[in-house]
């Protein structure tokens, strides 16, 4: 149904029609609640009246709405007004790429600037497990400031009808869905379909890479790579014809034709597998690509991967830096480049020992999978097994020149083999070592039960250089510059957590003296940048380190979270490696006892926040929805950490203890409990914690919440809720202020107080012999003003940001929403509770302790969920994180 200008659609005022979209009419509208202009995309009637499809679409849209990227058009919500349904989208001003191409071919420099931004958008979506499926120029907007926005991410999948009944054809919904065709879908959609999508086969990120190649071809030539007068003709062209690369103008470098060829390979196995590789090459990350005709092995299928290597090398040589001469002169490396290597059909093996290594010059990555060692040249997305390593190996390590790979074989020997493969050469007998390194002077040092040993790279008699006491275990030895000091971790403990409490030491080989340089960490490594790095839990820490004095010069800083520890017995190994040139590689993961932070939609569907694994509890969302403060650890070992949603980064804020964190009203600081007092610390990591006078707490109570003006902090004890006012401490410093909200009649204790957004009411839970119930009371308190909202066992009240809902956790494990009808200074009215979803899959919604969830401004929920309890969307295969020039980031974080 067309919408008239000036009409209302829910809370939106229609400002005028924009045009027809792939799913219906599009209108410009004003969000009267938030005061911003948006795009309303009206869904076709056939779609809007299919309740099953609409419900599924709503779930998909929630996932898509979690994407936050400068080059991705945002999805704000799904609205309805009567029988009409509409998507609420970010309003992106400017022409589409299709409009721009209609004016003629795009100059090379302009086309590449556009292409780079499209690649960044695709990479971000793919990392979140979302495939576009319908990338085309009409879905790409060009803003006047040069920003590119990719629209309609994943909506092709979301619009797909009856997936259970049409599991194969559903992968190409824009062609096979009648309702979609009736909604005005243009013929050109077929021109950007990958061959596997056109055949109705399953699709993944490689289909988007195909479409990216087709879009890039069209930008250069002004015409589509695959054409036809009918859909069937276009699809026949996609399936059978090669793109006419000769149509690309002469001023486009020949290397670009090779990029297009690699993207437009009809066999997805031979196509580039990851947008990160394309994006990195565009940014000039690969300065010295390996010669494309140098094989890794003599495997029969070498031609297939060689073709991909040629493509990757060509891309690497074509960096986007310095647009005028791009493809001719590589740009210098950018400070930090992060991408992912996904294992194919193989899986990591021998995970009780180190599984990966990186060469000193950053050029090669090795990892243990399927009982052999795989090698990937960093400029080549394809990894191949190294012949001669199929001995169920562990602990791979590179020679200093990167031409040999060493490993421990299950035969009980350390061996080495050339990276091109061949017969492995034995070096020495050894127990399964706890870390091995190959030094620049041609010796190999390794740790085993008796201590640390070394052997020459040409084999010979091993030398016992550090002897372990009967109760000591040592691991991760590294020879320090100068050749006399050995850095390693040592512990006398056993059981879980033994290595997290280990000592990191340096021992002089000439004098036999041992010096402890850090207490409480494992898997240490000294970097030439002047840093000592180590792991504790699943976090990589760094400290400035004076090599001459053998002393740290600053406190520890968390730099990478979610680093996998070795499986099996607690032996301390962390699955990471750092090259001499400052590249970091690591496997993500967490201990099974740990949790992930998750965002949960109103249907109860969780989405794991990347890089958020840890022993977390009590998440509290910042006022701007971009940061989450959590307590990590329990009791005396707890500290405060902050998770930044923008960069998926987790950083430790306190180091001397802290529990029950809450944000101040303006988001500038964190208030927390330490011992029986309350403290506060700047949230931007710029200062130290300071005690708040007059804030004695008892038991497990508080802090709870600041009011919207930052004038009152609620905390307390079993006798009632206390209110702290900055600048007005109690008469006796350290004594608790007067009770601000007393116990309701018949209650024996109360806790978890939260201000309503207008500051006029406080919700809290009060306990009695019959259980806990939810109450609200006016603030300031007045006799007779308290109301009991639940007559059943319930707790953990949290207000929506607009004050229109109050959420509680009911006995039995359900999250409920009470609609707030009035919360004025004189009255509070509410509706009967509505159950949203069960909280049983998630940790910490119990009625004891502190509140273990929070709500965002768009009424999603942040909580914790056991790691691995639900599968994440996207690629299920194992992943290796690769961060080039990581040391530059380290210097910034830990100066």
Image (spheres, rainbow, N blue to C red):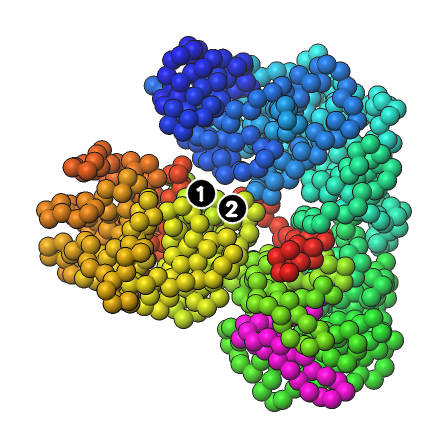
The residue under label 1 is: 625
Q: Name the residue: 66% across, 16% down.
A: 99
The range drawn in magenta is: 499-527
Kindly state the secondary structure of the residue where label 2 is placed. Answer: loop
Q: Secondary structure at mark 1?
A: loop
Across and down, in percent, residue 414 comes to 77, 74
Residue 331, image x and y in percent?
Answer: 80, 42
Quadrant housing the C terminus: bottom right
> In the rendered image of this protein, does residue 408 appear above or below residue 608?
below
Q: Nearer the viewer, residue 75 or 514?
A: 514
Q: Earlier in the sequence, mark 1 or mark 2?
A: 1
Residues under labels 1 and 2: Cα distance?
Answer: 8 Å
Q: Residue at x 74, y 89 (%)?
A: 511
Q: Which residue is mark 2?
A: 645
Q: Residue at x 57, y 41 (%)?
A: 129
Looking at the image, residue 673 sits to the left or right of residue 543; the answer is left
Q: Are marks 1 and 2 in contact (CB under 8 Å)?
A: yes
Q: Is residue 557 left or right of residue 765?
A: right
């Amino acid at each position: 149904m067309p919408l008239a200008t000036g009409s209302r659609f829910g809370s939106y005022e229609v400002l005028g029609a924009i045009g027809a979209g792939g799913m219906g009419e599009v209108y410009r509208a004003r969000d009267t609640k938030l005061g911003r202009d948006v795009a309303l995309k009206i869904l076709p009637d056939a779609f809007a009246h299919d309740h099953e499809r609409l419900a599924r679409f709503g779930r998909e849209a929630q996932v898509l709405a979690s994407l936050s990227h400068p080059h991705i058009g945002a999805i704000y919500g799904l609205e309805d007004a009567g029988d009409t349904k509409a998507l609420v989208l970010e309003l992106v001003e400017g022409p589409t790429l299709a409009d721009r191409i209609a004016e003629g071919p795009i100059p090379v420099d302009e086309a590449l600037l556009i292409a780079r931004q499209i690649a960044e958008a695709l990479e971000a979506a793919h990392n979140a497990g979302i495939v576009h499926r319908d990338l085309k120029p009409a879905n790409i907007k060009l803003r006047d400031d040069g920003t590119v926005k990719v629209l309609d991410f994943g909506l092709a999948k979301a619009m797909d009808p009856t997936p259970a009944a049409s599991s194969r054809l559903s992968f190409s919904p824009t062609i096979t869905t009648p309702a979609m065709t009736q909604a005005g879908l243009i013929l050109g959609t077929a021109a950007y379909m990958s061959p596997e999508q056109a055949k109705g086969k399953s699709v993944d990120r490689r289909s988007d890479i195909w479409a990216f190649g087709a879009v890039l071809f069209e930008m250069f030539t002004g015409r589509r790579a695959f054409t036809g007068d009918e859909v069937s003709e276009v699809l026949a062209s996609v399936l059978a014809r090669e793109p006419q690369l000769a149509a690309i103008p002469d001023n486009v470098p020949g290397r670009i034709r090779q990029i297009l060829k690699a993207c437009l390979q009809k066999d997805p196995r031979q196509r580039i597998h990851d947008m990160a590789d394309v994006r990195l090459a565009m940014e000039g990350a690969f300065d010295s690509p390996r010669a494309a005709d140098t094989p890794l092995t003599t495997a029969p299928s070498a031609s297939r991967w060689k073709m991909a290597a040629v493509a990757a090398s060509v891309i690497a040589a074509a960096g986007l830096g310095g647009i005028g001469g791009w493809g001719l002169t590589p740009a210098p490396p950018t400070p930090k480049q992060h991408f992912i290597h996904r294992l194919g059909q193989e899986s990591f093996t021998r995970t009780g020992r180190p599984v990966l290594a990186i060469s000193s010059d950053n050029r090669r990555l090795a990892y243990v999978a399927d009982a052999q060692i795989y090698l990937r040249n960093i400029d080549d997305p394809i990894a191949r097994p190294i012949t001669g390593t199929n001995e169920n190996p562990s602990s791979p390590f590179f020679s200093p020149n990167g031409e040999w790979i060493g490993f421990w074989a299950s035969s009980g020997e350390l061996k080495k083999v050339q990276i091109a493969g061949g017969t492995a050469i034995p070096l020495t007998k050894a127990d399964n070592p706890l870390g091995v390194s190959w030094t620049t002077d041609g010796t190999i040092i390794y740790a085993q039960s008796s201590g640390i040993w070394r052997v020459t790279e040409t084999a010979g008699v091993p030398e016992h250089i550090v002897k372990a006491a009967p109760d000591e275990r040592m691991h991760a030895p590294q020879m320090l510059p100068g050749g006399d000091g050995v850095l390693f971790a040592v512990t006398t403990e056993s059981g879980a957590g033994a290595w997290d409490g280990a000592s990191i030491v340096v021992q002089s080989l000439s004098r036999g003296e041992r010096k402890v340089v850090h207490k409480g960490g494992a898997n240490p490594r000294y970097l030439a940048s002047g840093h000592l790095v180590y792991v504790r839990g699943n976090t990589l820490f760094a400290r400035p380190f004076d090599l001459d004095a053998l002393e740290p010069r600053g406190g520890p800083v968390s730099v990478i979270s979610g680093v996998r520890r070795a499986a099996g017995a607690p032996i301390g190994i962390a699955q990471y490696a750092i090259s001499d040139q400052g590249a970091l590689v690591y496997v993500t993961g967490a201990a099974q006892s740990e949790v992930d932070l998750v965002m949960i939609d109103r249907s109860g569907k969780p989405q794991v926040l990347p890089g958020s694994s840890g022993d977390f509890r009590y998440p509290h969302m910042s006022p701007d929805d971009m940061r989450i403060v959590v307590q990590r650890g329990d009791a005396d070992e707890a500290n405060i950490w902050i998770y930044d949603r923008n960069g998926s980064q987790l950083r430790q804020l306190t180091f001397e203890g802290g529990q029950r964190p809450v944000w101040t009203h303006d988001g500038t600081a964190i208030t927390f409990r330490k011992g029986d007092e309350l403290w506060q610390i700047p949230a931007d990591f710029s200062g130290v914690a300071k005690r708040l006078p007059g804030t004695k707490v008892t038991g497990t109570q508080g802090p709870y919440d600041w009011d919207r003006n930052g004038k009152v902090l609620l905390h307390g004890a079993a006798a009632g809720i206390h209110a702290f006012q900055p600048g007005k401490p109690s008469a006796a410093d350290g004594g608790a202020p007067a009770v601000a909200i007393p116990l309701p009649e018949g209650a024996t204790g109360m806790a978890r107080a939260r201000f309503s957004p207008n500051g006029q009411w406080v919700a809290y839970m009060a306990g009695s012999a019959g259980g806990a119930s939810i109450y609200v009371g006016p603030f300031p308190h007045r006799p007779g003003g308290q109301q009991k909202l639940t007559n059943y066992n319930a707790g953990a009240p949290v207000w929506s940001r607009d004050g229109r809902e109050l959420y509680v956790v009911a006995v039995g494990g359900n999250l409920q929403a009470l609609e707030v009808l009035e919360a004025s200074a004189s009255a509070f009215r509410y509706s009967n509770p509505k159950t949203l979803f069960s909280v049983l899959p998630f940790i910490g919604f119990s009625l004891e302790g502190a509140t273990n969830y929070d709500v965002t401004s768009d009424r999603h929920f942040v909580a914790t969920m056991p790691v691995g309890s639900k599968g994440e969307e996207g690629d299920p295969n194992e992943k290796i994180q690769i961060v080039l020039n990581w040391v530059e980031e380290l210097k910034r974080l830990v100066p």
